[in-house]
Every structure is written in C-alpha cells, then in structure tokens.
Image: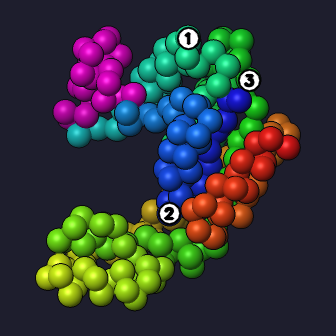
Amino acid sequence: MRIVLLGAPGSGKGTQAFKLQTDMGLPQISTGELLREAVAAGTELGLRADAHMKNGELVSDDIVLGIIKDRLAASDTAKDYLLDGFPRNLGQAESLDQVLIDLDQSLDAAILMDVDFEILIKRLTGRRTCSKTGKLLNIYFSTKAELEECLTNGGELLQRADDNEDTIRNRLRVYKRETEPLIEFYADRGILRVIDANGIADEVYASLKKVLVS
C-alpha cells in the first residue's frame, strides 16, 4: 500500500510509522532523512539543499519534491511505502499529486491519527527524559513507579527547552493552519481514513492495522 500518515505533533505518527515499517515491511519515507542522505551523498539536489540549510533557510519545495520523486522511483517503493511528514500543506499535496502522476502511481490511503487537543498538550509538555537512564517518560501518563524509579536512583526528569506550553501551542496552531486542510483534501479524493489515536500505542496500532486491511 501507498500511504500518507497525517496527524498533529504528539499524535504518535513516528511511533506508528516505525511499527508499520517493522511489522509490514513498508518503506518509511521521511523527508528529513532523505535530505540528510542526499546531502551526505553529494547529489545535485543534496548540494542545493545543503546550500539552503547552511544559509539558515528552509529547503524549497521543489528540492524536497525532487528528492521524494527519486525515492519513490526506487525499486523497493514500486508498490508500497509510507510517507511520514510530507505533505505538510496544500501546495505540497498538489505537487505530490503531480509527482505521482509522473510516476504512474496513486495513494491508497491518507490516514489521520486523530487526538484530542488537550491530550496533545499533555503528551508534548509532559515529556521528560531520565538523566540517569535516558528513558523517555511523561509526567501525566507514565506510572508513579516509573517516575519514582528515575528519581530514587539519583536521576532527574529533564524537559526539552522547546517542550514548553507556549512553544507547543504555537506548533499546534501552525499545524491547524497549514496541515489540517489536508484532511478535507484527501477526504475529497475518497482515501481519508481516520483512527482514534487517543489511547496507548498498541491500541492505536491495532486500530491502524484494522483500517489498512478493511
């Protein structure tokens, strides 16, 4: 299957994409990873992307699309792949449609991982890393025993600087403005599938697999 995975920051896209890749063998296509690989390989597109990044600029959509097109034309993505983190807006979605036409491909599903706004806030602002073990925890969702295990062993619960509530709410506003319109875009094409992603990872994955085989 050819899938686009949609969802706000904190919806668990990365976790579920990894599960799909591991369990079903779907090649996971991440724009960030593709850009790093293109830069490291010194390809024409990679060199252009590197120039943008060294100047502190966003990599332009035409470069990103060119790198994605090259990846989708590879032998291991002829029938199956998972696009994670792209497209992020309507312009990118429309450009991706043209790339797929050029490659004589089409998407099978756009899967929206739907999570309540306040749960997203808690998932993101509550993230902590144990300084002793490196274990990822959450002050709202991890058990009391897990949190105390870190502290009693001399560790601290560290929060990333960009996990503060103001930054998180801004990220979600950007998602709502830029990416949320893709829900209607793919619904109009009849390929949108929505799953309840409020629960724990294994429950969400079970729902995700059910949607893919239905």
Question: Mark 1 or mark 2, which is nearer the start of the sequence?
Answer: 2
Q: Which of 22 and 14 lies nearest the eye of the viewer?
A: 22
Within 10 Å of the Cα at label 2, are there few (<14), some (14-19), or many (20+) other Cα atoms?
many
Q: Quadrant of the C terminus?
A: top right
Give the residue type at disc 1.
Answer: Ser
> Residue 57 appears in which quarter of the rendering?
top left
Chain-order first, disc 1 or disc 3: 1
Which quarter shows the N terminus? top right
What is the crowding at mark 1: few (fewer than 14 residues within 10 Å), some, or many (at least 20)?
few
Which residue occupies the foreground of this view, 37 or 60?
37
Does 137 sit above or below residue 202?
below
Q: Secondary structure at mark 2?
A: loop
Residue 135 at x, y percent in the picture: 30, 66
| Residue at the left extreme, as displayed | 154
Mark 2 touching mark 1, by CB under 8 A? no
The Cα atoms of the two marked residues, 2 and 3, are separated by 28 Å
Q: Identify which residue is drawn at 36% across, 73% down.
A: 137
Q: Which residue is mark 3?
A: 106
- Identify the mark nearer the N-term, 2 or 3: 2
Query: Where 83 falls versus 116 (above or below)?
Result: above
Task: Point out residue 127 in the picture as x, y percentages from the top left corner.
Answer: 37, 72
Residue bearing mark 2: 10
Name the amino acid, label 3: Ser
Cα distance in 3D space between marks 2 and 1: 32 Å
Q: Which residue lies under the disc numbered 1? A: 75
Q: What residue span does the magenta drawing correspond to?
A: 34-55
